[in-house]
């Protein structure tokens, strides 16, 4: 495409165009899961979505000579990342485009320029808007739909990024395993660990939800502090995500690990709601809500998006207690498999643990970056 121009998104009309564009890119793709439009709109609401309380974003559209949208991107100035890491990295997210290098180049140029004007030296992504939301470009595992809150994209996006000068900076892995193998693998060691460390597992107490969420918030930030790219969540961000999770989660599948009565770890397992979202075409109304409840009953897979143990209690095998209890409770509730995602390629211990559990690495997501 020889003539295409980028325009910054402002106002409802262009934002709606930005949000609806993916339906054109993925038309006929059986593995694409349409996002819920009301949730996407909320993400760009500066008064409601907590990310905007500390950082800035600027979405762009790419238009052809006839004024038709052919691509989109969002530049993300994550002030908390810059303050925490001091590495000059700005981000891009919500990238979607037809298979045309000129379109991709124009979009990356617009996002890069916006970030450069704010002092960034590199552009990294994709992240919608951060690693606490959907992130990473799918580079392996295109033969099946993504699970809840994981990304999906056409295979040709890899070429669009690499031809635009982006190179790999980190891979994220997704593991898939059946749940019935857990008891035989972990039952004996679980009993030993419980006695040795006076350890126990309990579900989140929904009757004391405020206190429980504050507890989980502190464990989360302290247990993930050494992960690549990690930035501590603000209280507002954590509570916003937790509010959504507690609406959809089975209370018995949000677990707290205690040692000598002290909470030292947690894990969350969520139903793969993409099974329902695939049928809803992005809308809750008028019929989407009925499809949601109908297909939600058919979900047999979980996603385990977060598990953490605070410093001083890692390397003791206590994570296996969380794995085992999650599997037992999940099977009681009719689930038969689970995805562990995502796991950094540099997290050797977690990758080894996932394979020892009998899980198979079946999808890979990638962070790319380039100098601005």
Image: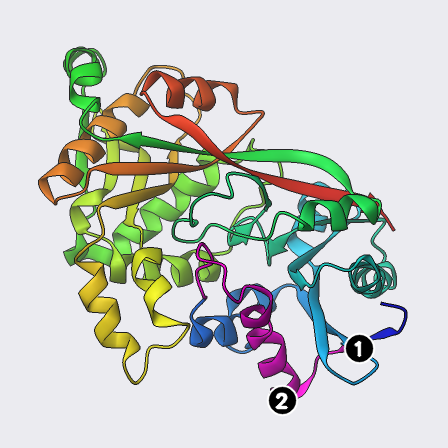
Q: Nearer the viewer, mark 1 or mark 2?
A: 1
> Residue beneath label 1, please?
64
Asked whether residue 30 is drawn in magenta, I would say: yes
Query: What kind of element bears circle 1?
Result: strand
Asked whether residue 91 is drawn in magenta, I would say: no
Q: Residue at x 41, y 63 (%)?
A: 240
Q: Is residue 359 above or below residue 135?
A: above
Total marks placed:
2
Q: Quadrant of residue 107?
A: bottom right
Identify the mark at residue 13; answer none if there is no mark.
Answer: 2
Q: Residue at x 63, y 76 (%)?
A: 18
- 137 with respect to 184 (left or right): right
- 31 with respect to 327 (left or right): right
Q: Is residue 237 above or below residue 171?
A: below
Q: Quadrant of residue 1?
A: bottom right
Q: CA distance from mark 1 to mark 2?
A: 18 Å
Q: Which residues are magenta?
A: 6-34
């Amino acid at each position: 495409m020889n003539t295409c121009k980028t325009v910054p998104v402002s106002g409802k009309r262009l934002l709606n165009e930005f949000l609806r564009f993916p339906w054109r890119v993925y038309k006929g793709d059986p593995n694409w899961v349409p996002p819920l439009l009301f949730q996407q709109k909320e993400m760009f609401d500066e008064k409601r979505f907590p990310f905007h309380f500390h950082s800035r974003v600027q979405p762009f559209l790419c238009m052809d000579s006839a004024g038709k949208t052919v691509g989109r991107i969002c530049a993300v100035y994550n002030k908390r990342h810059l303050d925490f890491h001091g590495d000059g990295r700005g981000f891009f997210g919500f990238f979607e485009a037809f298979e045309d290098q000129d379109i991709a180049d124009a979009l990356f140029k617009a996002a890069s320029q916006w970030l450069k004007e704010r002092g960034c030296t590199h552009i990294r992504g994709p992240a919608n808007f951060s690693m606490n939301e959907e992130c990473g470009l799918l580079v392996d595992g295109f033969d099946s739909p993504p699970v809840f809150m994981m990304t999906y994209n056409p295979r040709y996006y890899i070429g669009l990024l690499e031809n635009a000068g982006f190179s790999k900076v980190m891979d994220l892995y997704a593991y898939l395993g059946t749940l019935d193998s857990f008891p035989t693998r972990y039952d004996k060691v679980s009993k030993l660990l419980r006695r040795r460390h006076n350890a126990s597992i309990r579900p989140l107490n929904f009757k004391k939800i405020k206190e429980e969420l504050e507890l989980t918030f502190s464990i989360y930030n302290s247990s993930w502090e050494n992960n690549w790219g990690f930035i501590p969540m603000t209280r507002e961000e954590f509570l916003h995500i937790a509010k959504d999770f507690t609406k959809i989660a089975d209370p018995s599948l949000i677990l707290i690990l205690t040692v000598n009565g002290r909470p030292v770890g947690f894990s969350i397992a969520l139903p793969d709601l993409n099974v329902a979202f695939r049928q809803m075409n992005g809308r809750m109304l008028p019929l989407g809500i009925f499809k949601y409840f109908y297909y939600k009953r058919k979900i047999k897979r979980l996603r385990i998006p977060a598990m953490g143990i605070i410093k001083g209690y890692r390397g003791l095998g206590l994570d296996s207690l969380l794995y085992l209890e999650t599997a037992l409770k999940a099977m009681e509730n009719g689930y038969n498999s689970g995805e562990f995602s995502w796991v950094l390629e540099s997290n050797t211990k977690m990758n080894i643990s996932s394979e020892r559990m009998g899980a198979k690495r079946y999808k890979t997501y990638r962070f790319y970056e380039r100098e601005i």
